[in-house]
Every structure is written in structure tokens, then in C-alpha cells.
Amino acid sequence: MPKNSKVVKRELDDEVIESVKDLLSNEDSSDDAFKKSELMVDDREEKDVDVEEGSDVEDERPAWNSKLQYILAQVGFSVGLGNVWRFPYLCQKNGGGAYLVPYLILLLIIGIPLFFLELAVGQRIRRGSIGVWNYISPKLGGIGFASCVVCFFVALYYNVIIGWSLFYFSQSFQHPLPWDQCPLVKNASHTFVEPECEKSSATTYYWYREALNISSSLSESGGLNWKMTICLLAAWVMVCLAMIKGIQSSGKIMYFSSLFPYVVLLCFLIRGLLLNGSVDGIRHMFTPKLEIMLEPKVWREAATQVFFALGLGFGGVIAFSSYNKRDNNCHFDAVLVSFINFFTSVLATLVVFAVLGFKANIINEKCVTQNSEKILKLLKMGNLSQDMIPHHINFSSITAKDYNLVYDIIQKVKEEQFDSLGLKSCQIEDELDKAVQGTGLAFIAFTEAMTHFPASPFWSVMFFLMLVNLGLGSMFGTIEGIITPIVDTFKVRKEILTVICCLVAFFIGLIFVQRSGNYFVTMFDDYSATLPLLIVVILENIAVIRIYGIDKFMEDLKDMLGFSPSQYYYYMWKYVSPFVLLCLLVASIVQMGLSPPGYNAWIEDTAMEEFHSYPTWGMIVCISLMVLAILPVPIVFMVRRCNLIDDSSGSLASVSYKRGRIIKEPVNLEGDNTSLIHGKSPSEVPSPNFGKNIYRKQTGSPTLDTAPNGRYGIGYLMADMPDMPESDL
């Protein structure tokens, strides 16, 4: 340390001690608690201290144990069930390999910039979603409450899917698997195959009848499905135990829940590539259909997938980031997590279509065998001439290629009578073109394919354990998006709030484990999140870029990161991202208006799905979900606008005393655009995070001030000594 720095430091220490004496001499003599305490300088760099008046215990904000733990948490939150059962479906439906082009473009335009924005504000302000947007502008505090409501709605039904996976996981420890064959029904005279199963398939029957025991309409409740109720309870217990200590407990679980799915996916990929027909599935998957790529629908669905894949607007990204150090390179985190998410989707797509290619090959072989037998019968009956069959064809061991050759010959020769022959074209591409997504992929198509695997119970256990882990990783982020903002805002105990939240969610979630519960899951999935989250993210963009100021935000990022972010983000945040988000919002509203609101009901008699429109009360529920999710935004705006709540106790001048430590708790005043990074505004407001705080008496300040919170304030300001290195202080 330079000599002159030592002299200045000694003088500064003397000045601080003298200021402390002034403070103590002016303190109310009746305040015994204060007299027993000491005024200390907080010289810890990376601690954020939340204080409450009168508390005896210091409540410091938790922090991640390591950077790896934080990255795994963000990856676990962003990589969810949608990567496995939504992305492959969209890729197949929208042009195969060509779909990756619009997806990557939109990932760069709206995905990474908005993900970076949420990481930056959460890391610097170190609050949950409510505190972050309150800090920027109290009138926009409703954004955080809206995020919490959406998180709660999503958590209600998302944990039901984890419950379904737990049920299948528990049933996988059997050989053969219980969905391998259709069940037999016995009566007094004979035994026969269950008609509902015979009309569909063994896996379809097991899903709808054995697992869900589904009713035939939304209005037909049918009572609780007790098997699924127990699984739902188990799922909520797991979430509660993992989240009860916040990131201190969930962070450790992330090592398993985030990494295990990759182990399973790699195992499935290696096993899948060794299966007959897997290459056909992968080839079909990535064969580009460029003409489809130019359709607007493809870009809309790609934008929606990018948006939800990264968990934008939920508040989980902000919550996790708020436990970071302030100098963490969140730009690197945003790019890393975004591309991990993308490559996970591609890996899952490879796995899914390798397995579906194997399944399609088995179905195609059955088709060839059945139709070859028909041809032999037609030859014996004289309906077909033996002369039209090539001499090298052997129907006892016919290949798919040879069958298609015979099929084409018969179709040309018997052109007029061909339809009456009842022959089918057995093309593996036709089977692969049957797009499946969501529960249909995980619980029907994939389970059917696994029944043909050697050691099928092992692969079934691995697959459903992977789904449970993928779901839990996303649930941790979703619950953190609820708990963290409420704890930061209302200063309640995290353990109690977590238990109450999980209990309430479980009891509300009982509507999803009725016999008609699957239809409610569809309703919540379609209406509770899409539009509200789009509106939330648009408002987030406006809050930071327009109300706070894009230029100031870029300066703040430079101060926090240690380097200037690329101007690319400047133009994305200011122009491109808001425009794309508005287009996506309009397109989603139009799509919702054009698509008749309804659901696919399972009809037991026909063993098929049938589209049903929502009843009147169902439409009211759908509209209510969207309105309730976005309602906090206008309510909080009007409350702040009309000054219906007295914020005097939380003004910028308020000072709290705790164990002798003096802490300023800045709360943004109306119209005061507080800086995220420098902690400055036109009124020079300090940041809510304090590193090395040196207090000295303000020149010309009165001896005693009365703080708005009823305690005594003092005229001390943080020393601003630009010429002295911070380390020397």
C-alpha cells in the first residue's frame, strides 16, 4: 500500500470513529438495544444483507457454492420435458433439419438477448422478480407478481406430469412390462382380449385406462384416481424437501437431477443406433424440407419454442441469478446455457427418432408379413396371376423392398380392381410421418418401442427416471420463481412459505388427478402461460430499455462485467426483440382465435380420441386463467399511480439497525429511475448491494435526522474517493 494511502486511511478511520461518537451521543437514551450494539463498517465484498428491524439474527442472502452448481441449476430449469417431447415433434412437423435454421436465428434474436437481460438484472439487484421490477419502477411491480402467478399455475400441472412419470417408473420393475400385452378378460364361457385394447394398442390402453382411468369428457369428473393422487403427493413431497432450504438444499440435488438426464440420453442414443431401423428414423428426421421452412407458421412455432425453452418470464432465471456474485460474467452464462439447451434438444431429437425408427421398422415388418399373406391367399383363389410375381420373390422371407416391388406391379396391372384387394403400402416413411408429441410420445410411442428392447424393464426404469429428473429440474426453478420474490418482498421465513406453497398446490392439484384430470392439464397448458408470459417479457423489455434507459443499462453492464457488451445487444434489445415479441403476441392471439377452444377426449367404445369443445364453464375457466395471470400488472400500476399504499416506510432515506450494522435499504421512489449497476439515478441513489461501505459525516448536514421508519437517521454518506484504490480502503 502506498504511504500516502496509509495516511489517508488513518485520517479516514479517525473521521469514521468521530462520526460514530456523534451518532451515539445523539441516540435516544431510552433505546437500550441500540446502546448495547456497535456501529460497524461492512467490509465484505460479495454479501447482500437483508435486515429487519428488531431482529437478533443476521439474515444474509444465500449464495451458490460454486459456479458449476449455478450453471447446472440454470440448465436444469431451462432443459425440461419440452426438450424431449416437444422439440422433436416440431422438428419433424416443420421441415426436419430445415427447422433448425429458423430456430437458431430466433435463438440469437430473442432467446439469448432476453435471457441475458434477465440474468443481468437479477444478478445486480439481487432480488426476485417482484423486487427487481419494483426497484426499476414501482408502477411496474405487477410484472413480478404476474410472473409468480404464472409460475404457480404452471407448477400445479407440471408436477402432475412428474407424478405420471413416477407411476410408470414404479411399474417398470416387472418383466414383461405391464403394457407389453393387452389384458385378457374372462367370463363364464371363454377368454377374450379386452375390446378397448384390441381396438387401439397395449400401450395406449394402459395409458388411458390403467394409468389415468380417464373419463369420456371434461364435465364427467369420475372422482379421484387414487394411484395418481399418491404419485402427485410423492412428487410434491420431493419438491418440498428439495426446496425447503432454498438453493442450499436444491443446489446440491442439481448435480444429479441436471446431469443424470444426459447420461440416460447418451445411453439411449448408443443403444438406439444399434437397433434395426434407427438410421431410417434419423435420416427421415433431418431430411430438410426447405419449402416448409418459408411458411410463417414454422417461424411462429420456432419463436414460441425458443421463448419457453429458456424459461423466459417465469422469474426462475432472475431468482437463480440473484444469488450470484455481482461481478459474475452473466453474458457467458447466457450464451452457454442457451446453447446447452439447444444441443440438448438436438440430442433428444436424435434419441427419439432413433427409437421411433426402430419402432416404425417393427410395425413395417408386421405390415409386410400381413399383406404378403393376403397376396398368397389371392394367388390361391385365382384373383391374382402367378405370372405377375417376379421369380426371385419368396413370400416366406420377403423383405420390405421386395414387397413394395410386388405391390407396385399389382397396382399397375389391377388398377381398376386394386382397391377391392385390400392391400396396403408398407412404407417406413408413412409410419415416421405420424407426428407424436407430449404424453403421446412419452407414455405411448416410446413405451411401446421399449417393450421390444432387450432387457426392456431396465430401459423403462432409466427413461422414466430421466423424465422425473427433467421435471424436477424445471420445478425447482419454477418454485424458486414463486418463493424468492415473496421472501424478498414480505420477509417471511422461506421454510414455512415453501411448505405452505407445496401444500396449497397439492390440494388445488387434486383437480388434475380426477378421472377427467388429463383434460384440465391440457386446459392449463394451453391457456395459463402462453399469452401472459409473452406480455410479461414484453413489459420486462420495456421496463429496462425504455423506462430505465438502454444507454444507462449498457454502461451498467460494462461496470458489472468489466467489459462493454457487444452493440449487437443494444440493437436487439432496443429494436429487434420488442418487434419480434409483439409479432409473436399478435400471431398467438390470432392462432388462439382461429383454433376452436377444445380438447381431445378419449372415447372408450371406439378406443379413439375425439375432439370436444369446452363447455361454457370451461371457457370461463380458460379466460379466467389468462386474466388472473396478467391482472397484477394493471392493479399494481393503478395502486402506485393513485398512491393507495403509503410507501414512506420504505423510502430511500430509511436506515435499519441490526447487530450494530447500519444498512440502507433503497426502495425506488415514484419517478426515480434507479440504476441497476452504478446504483445511481438523478437523485444519486445507492445500489441495494453493498460491498465495502465506508461512512463519514456529510459536510453541512444537520446533527440529527428523523428517518421515515421512526428510527433515528444520520447524515452519513458513502465515501466517494475516486483517487484511492478500493483495496487500500
Image (cartoon, grey):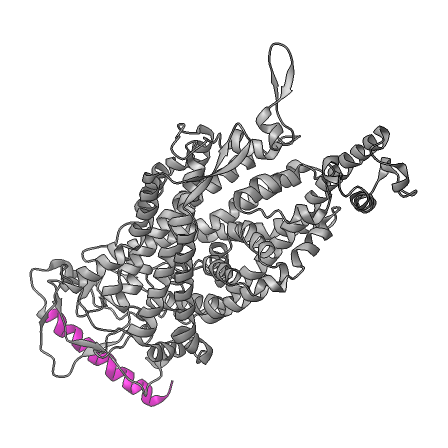
Which one is nearer the viewer's eye here, 220 or 309? 220
Return the x and y of residue 465 as percentages of the image width and height: 56, 43
Q: Which residue is farthest left?
A: 29
Return the x and y of residue 540 as percentages of the image width and height: 34, 65
Span shown in magenta: 1-25
Can you say whether 189 is above or below 685 in the image? above
Can you say whether 282 is above or below 455 in the image? below
Q: Residue at x 76, y 34 (%)?
A: 370
| Rendered image quadrant of residue 447 | top right
Q: Residue at x 40, y 73 (%)?
A: 573
Membership of 477 in magenta stretch: no
Q: Which residue is farthest bottom?
A: 4
Q: How many marks?
A: 0
| Rendered image quadrant of residue 713 | bottom left
From this viewpoint, is residue 516 visible?
Answer: yes
Q: Quadrant of the C terminus?
A: bottom left
Which one is nearer the viewer's eye here, 453 or 205? 205
From this viewpoint, is residue 271 visible?
Answer: no
Which one is nearer the viewer's eye here, 380 or 528? 380
Q: Main secondary structure of the magenta part?
A: helix
Return the x and y of residue 633 as percentages of the image width and height: 27, 59
